[in-house]
Image (spheres, rainbow, N blue to C red):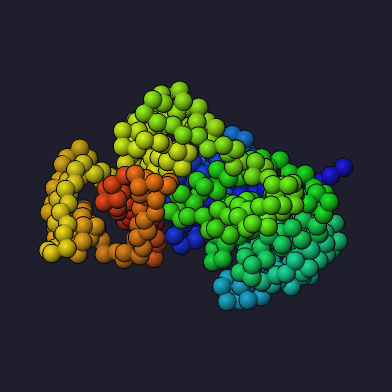
């Protein structure tokens, strides 16, 4: 019988804590629903004790997700465990994920604890967590740079104290596949108590080996893989879920294990996550890159036309790339739009659907053919106008090559209209200065501005992403319009909405602490 490998997704925790990857509550909920459709076994929704914002998002995901376990990370401290327990109260299947570092370098310099004290802490805190939650995962942070005998002792104690899952992280992405496989085999042999317990691997990608290490861990006897969508995560990221899942699916001869992942959900999950963090898919990224299934080179095309398997080891359908492109237009009604959304893998709530449909109709007046790419962009950009304190009401911009640009911007703030005028070095600069005059943000850095066309043709929509920096965090805003000045203003207001929400929330956090 094939052994089963579980997928533990940490896009919302390890992924989200990486610079430039922060997500709003709504966005986290959307990602969690995508992960549920993918049928991951566990969703790590956040680190409840780290801030009230994280607490709220763990609680919100825990309340909504029914078909996966929902986990919250906790340091080995009663306060952290209590916060996770509280945030997970409404979860159907809660999991508290307790961790402490076990490598000499971390114990000495970060924790300033002796190995014996670490062992006592593990025993005490895993017992404490187990009294509050039926499912406890224990992670030995920096396990792959820990002394193997000490690691075995830590694992023995964690299991004796009630841990159900033991995670072996390669925290700094230092390992190689051979080493990872041997480490798991050795651990299983040294600690017979691991029988019946899930052993997990959590691999960072600093040397580009996260996927290979995860697969090697599975060959060594790991029964849980910790991954993120698109490989988001600290520094070079974590093992990309799409790579690990597709390697298992494509090479059953080498990985004779079962998973319950629905790989046909990969494409949409990846797009949704890239859309939220305001990044475009790299062309050559495995599985989900724009060119991953393109066979442009003449010799390849010839082979693929004769028989797809000449150059194709997996099909686009297996990751959920839609078969056919459809074009909708002026005469397409609600039903056609709803049907196409469904075929593209979107299930929107009533309000979301109505607002997307209204924008689809507006777009049909401006653009003859509305393609799948346009529809995806409408769905991806449905939050900016609806969330946040500031909303664009009107704008008027004058630009020429002989004088400074002028912008008049009018924003709605809690139902009241505020208007300002500003001059600038071009229309976008003038508009952004006028917005700043209205909202008076704290001092921030303007990190990036990217504009791209959504589809082909001169009448295409422009999608703008602006990135602002405040207090070492990046806030990405998106805007979409057939008018690129409007798209630029919407993207900026979206980013400022996130920045200001964080600014106001951290004020609240300081009071809370
Ligand atoms: O990389 C790591 O060690 C982690 C742990 C907290 C599991 O993310
Ligand atoms: Zn990690």
305 and 45: which is toward the camera? 305
| Residue at x 35% of width, y 33% of height | 364
| Residue at x 17% of width, y 57% of height | 399
Q: Is residue 415 visible?
A: yes
| In the image: residue 3, left or right of residue 508 | right
Placement of 447 over or under 271, stated as above or below: below
Where, quadrant-wise, is the C terminus in this rendering? bottom left
Placement of 177 over or under 332, stated as above or below: below
415 and 71: which is toward the camera? 415
Where, quadrant-wise, is the N terminus in this rendering? top right
Q: Quadrant of residue 178?
A: bottom right
In percent of width and height, residue 16 lies at 50, 55
| Residue at x 60% of width, y 55% of height | 296
In percent of width and height, residue 240 lies at 62, 55
| In the image: residue 277, left or right of residue 286 | left
| Residue at x 35% of width, y 60% of height | 449
In percent of width and height, residue 2 lies at 84, 44
Q: Quadrant of residue 169?
A: bottom right
In percent of width and height, residue 435 lies at 21, 53
| In the image: residue 170, left or right of residue 425 | right
């Amino acid at each position: 019988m094939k052994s089963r490998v579980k997928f533990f997704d940490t896009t919302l925790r390890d992924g989200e804590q990486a610079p430039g990857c922060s997500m709003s509550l709504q966005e986290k909920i959307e990602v969690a629903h995508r992960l549920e459709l993918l049928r991951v076994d566990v969703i790590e929704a956040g680190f409840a004790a780290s801030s009230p914002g994280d607490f709220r998002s763990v609680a919100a995901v825990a309340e909504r997700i029914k078909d996966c376990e929902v986990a919250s990370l906790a340091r080995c401290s009663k306060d952290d465990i209590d916060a996770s327990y509280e945030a997970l109260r409404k979860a159907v299947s809660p999991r508290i994920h307790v961790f402490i570092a076990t490598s000499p370098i971390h114990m000495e310099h970060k924790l300033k604890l002796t190995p014996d004290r670490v062992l006592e802490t593990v025993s005490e805190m895993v017992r404490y967590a187990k009294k509050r939650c039926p499912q406890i995962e224990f992670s030995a942070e920096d396990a792959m740079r820990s002394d193997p005998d000490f690691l075995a002792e830590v694992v023995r104690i964690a299991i004796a104290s009630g841990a159900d899952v033991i995670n072996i992280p390669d925290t700094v992405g230092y390992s190689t596949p051979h080493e990872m496989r041997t480490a798991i085999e050795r651990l299983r042999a040294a600690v017979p108590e691991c029988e019946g317990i899930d052993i997990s691997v959590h691999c960072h990608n600093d040397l580009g080996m996260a996927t290979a290490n995860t697969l090697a861990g599975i060959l060594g006897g790991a029964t849980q893989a910790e991954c993120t969508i698109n490989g988001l995560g600290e520094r070079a990221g974590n093992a990309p879920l799409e790579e690990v899942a597709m390697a298992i699916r494509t090479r059953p001869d080498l990985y004779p294990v079962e998973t319950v992942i629905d790989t046909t959900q990969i494409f949409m999950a990846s797009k949704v996550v890239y859309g939220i963090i305001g990044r475009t898919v790299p062309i050559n990224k495995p599985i989900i890159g724009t060119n991953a299934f393109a066979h442009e080179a003449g010799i390849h095309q010839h082979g693929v036309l004769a028989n797809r398997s000449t150059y194709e080891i997996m099909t686009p359908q297996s990751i959920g790339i839609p078969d056919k492109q459809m074009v909708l237009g002026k005469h397409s009604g609600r039903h056609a739009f709803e049907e196409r959304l469904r075929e593209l893998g979107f299930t929107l709530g009533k309000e979301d659907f109505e607002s997307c449909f209204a924008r689809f109709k507006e777009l049909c007046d401006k653009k003859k053919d509305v393609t799948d790419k346009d529809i995806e962009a409408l769905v991806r950009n449905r939050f900016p106008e609806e969330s946040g304190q500031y909303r664009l009401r009107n704008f008027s911009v004058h630009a020429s090559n002989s004088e400074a640009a002028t912008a008049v911007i009018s924003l709605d703030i809690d139902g009241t209209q505020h208007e300002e005028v500003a001059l600038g070095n071009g229309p976008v600069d003038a508009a952004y200065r006028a917005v700043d005059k209205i909202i008076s943000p704290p001092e921030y850095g303007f990190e990036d501005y990217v504009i791209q066309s959504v589809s082909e043709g001169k009448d295409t929509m422009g999608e703008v992403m602006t990135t602002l920096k405040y207090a070492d965090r990046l806030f990405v805003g998106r805007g979409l319009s057939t008018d690129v000045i409007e798209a630029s203003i919407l993207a900026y207001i979206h980013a400022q909405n996130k920045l200001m929400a964080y600014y106001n929330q951290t004020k609240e956090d300081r009071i809370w602490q």
